[in-house]
Amino acid sequence: MEIIPHKQVKQKIKRLAIEILEHNYDQEVIYLIGINNNGFRFAKLIQKEMQSMGSAEVRLINVRLNTARPLEEDITLSVDVDTLAGKTLILVDDVANSGRTLFYATKPLMEIVPGRLEAAVLVDRTHKMFPVNVDYVGISLATTLKQDIQVDLDDGRAFAVELN
């Protein structure tokens, strides 16, 4: 069942971009750190919106981790983590469920002291099992544990969020 159609997904991306810029109005550079595939796609869409507004430089970084077994493989960033010290970092994913993915995605960032570390998601579910706070939320949903959220952000297709 589709819960957010293409037009509303685009509106939420724009609103999140505005919120991030408003909250970080004093920053010259903002780093969006997209998690794996969908989180990175979502970060890229936010970056595009933010750049169209032109008030800050927005740099995109990819963080890769095994979400099913986060301790079995290295968690890697597409840049040297030392270059992020003292910077404004926004961790971006499509869905926050238990908070585990966001929690482990911060592991490489524990080697530095960022200026600010925040999180942005398109869909925030209410099943947090980790001490994770999401600062920028497209939509917050109370779902059952058995339900699944599917986010389609593929280029060239209609964006959608579905509840299964």
Image (cartoon, helix red, strand yellow):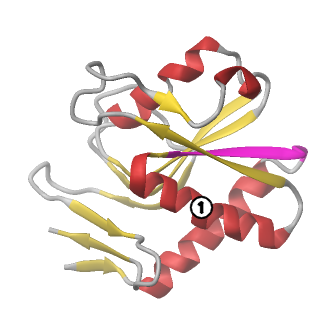
Q: Secondary structure at mark 1?
A: helix
Q: Is residue 30 left or right of residue 143?
A: right
Callout 1, which amino acid? Lys
Q: Where the N terminus falls, by quadrant?
A: bottom left
Give the prevailing secondary structure in the magenta stretch. strand
For the point 62% across and 63% down, the residue is: 46
Residue 139: horizontal and vertical position, in percent? 44, 63
In the displayed structure, 84 sits above or below 1; it is above
Q: How many marks?
A: 1
Determine whether, in the image, residue 138 is placed left or right of residue 36: right
Measuring from the top left, give residue 49's x and y in whole percent.
Answer: 70, 70
Quadrant in the picture for residue 109: top right
> Residue 138 versus residue 54: which sits nearer the camera?
54
Residue 133, percent from left and from top: 49, 36
Q: Is residue 16 visible?
A: no
Residue 5 falls left or right of residue 45: left
For the question of whether residue 104 can be seen, the reply is yes
Q: Which residues are magenta?
A: 26-34
Please state the horizontal and vertical placement of residue 24, each as a whole percent of the image: 80, 47
Q: Label 1, on which residue? A: 44
**Residue name at image x 87 percent, y 44 percent:** 27
In the image, residue 100 above or below residue 13:
above
- Image quadrant where residue 151 sits: bottom left
